[in-house]
Structures are given as C-alpha cells and as structure tokens.
Image: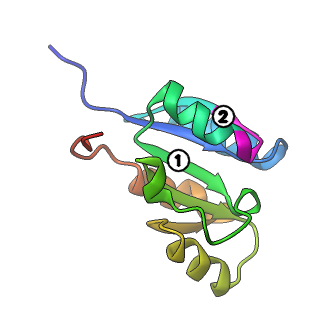
Amino acid sequence: MADPPSTKVLLADKPGFGRTALAGLLKDTPGITLVGKLGKRDLIKPAIEETRPDVLVIDDRLLRDDRWTGGDLGVRLIVVGVDDDPGFATRARHIGAEEWVPKDQADAILPLLLMPREPVSR
C-alpha cells in the first residue's frame, strides 16, 4: 500500500526560537515533510533546486523588496511573521504569497494551508 501524499516544505527563517518552533510544528504534522531549513535569503534558490519543495514557508524579515516573487521560484509561497500589521499581509500577497500567517497562530493555520495538493508541474 502506497504512503499518502506528503507536502514537502522548505523553511526559511532566521535562527532562533521562532524557527525552532516552526520546524517542530512542521516535523510533527502528518502529511508534511520538512525538507530543509535555512536562515539566509541568498540560500533559498539553491535550496529549492536541491530539495524540490512544494511550499516555501518564509519569515517576512527575509523578504527585502517587491521585485522577488514566489512565482519565480516555482513553489507555493507562505509568509510568516511576528508583526500583526495588515500591511505585512498585503505586501506578502503583492509579491506572490498565497498567505501571510502570524507566527503566534501558525500552529492553527499552517497545517491547514499545507495539506497535500495535486502536484505542480515544473
């Protein structure tokens, strides 16, 4: 019997308690496979090429400008952050994110957003 589909997630977040908590949440959620974690923006594209994730979960502090879009990476993009300001969610969607998630609500929201979907052709 084949294993059920799993969503492969790459986590990009600055080192610290927040990243540790998010990584733990992702590892412990059925249907999600954490394929890597990194803390620097310049490592994202090489990590995507190496791990081939379905979703990039990225801390909004690693987004520097509006020129970089999630669609350019060939993965679903979900942005997480600590500042509860509607402007951050607007900015995340503007650059191609499907969602902006406050870190203090990640345990309730992220598992629902990361449920396995049909494969995206690359």
Q: Residue at x 34, y 48 (%)?
A: 115
Q: Quadrant of residue 19?
A: top right
Q: Nearer the viewer, residue 21 or 33?
A: 33
Q: Amino acid at mark 1?
A: Leu
Q: Is residue 41 magenta?
A: yes
How far, Cα to Cα, is label 2 from label 1? 10 Å
Q: Residue furthest left?
A: 1
Left or right of 4? Residue 81 is right
Task: Measuring from the top left, give residue 63's x and y in whole percent.
Answer: 70, 61
Q: Residue furthest bottom?
A: 86
Task: Measuring from the top left, give residue 28's x and y in whole percent.
Answer: 53, 33
Write down the residue under mark 2: 37
Q: Residue furthest front?
A: 67
Q: Residue at x 43, y 58 (%)?
A: 71
- Asked whether disc 2 touches disc 1, contact meaning CB atoms under 8 Å apart, the reply is no
Left or right of 3? Residue 55 is right
Secondary structure found at label 1: strand
Q: Which mark is residue 56?
A: 1
Q: Quadrant of the C terminus?
A: top left
Which badge, 2 or 1, comes first in the chain's sequence? Answer: 2
Left or right of 114? Residue 47 is right
Q: Which residues are magenta?
A: 37-42
Q: Quadrant of residue 6?
A: top left
Q: Residue at x 44, y 66 (%)?
A: 98
**Colouring mode (rainbow / by chain / secondary structure / one colour):** rainbow
Q: Residue at x 49, y 39 (%)?
A: 9
Q: Is residue 84 magenta?
A: no
Taking 79 as reference, is 13 above or below it?
above
Taking 96 as reference, is 56 above or below it?
above
Secondary structure found at label 2: strand
Q: Which mark is residue 98?
A: none
Q: Quadrant of the N terminus?
A: top left
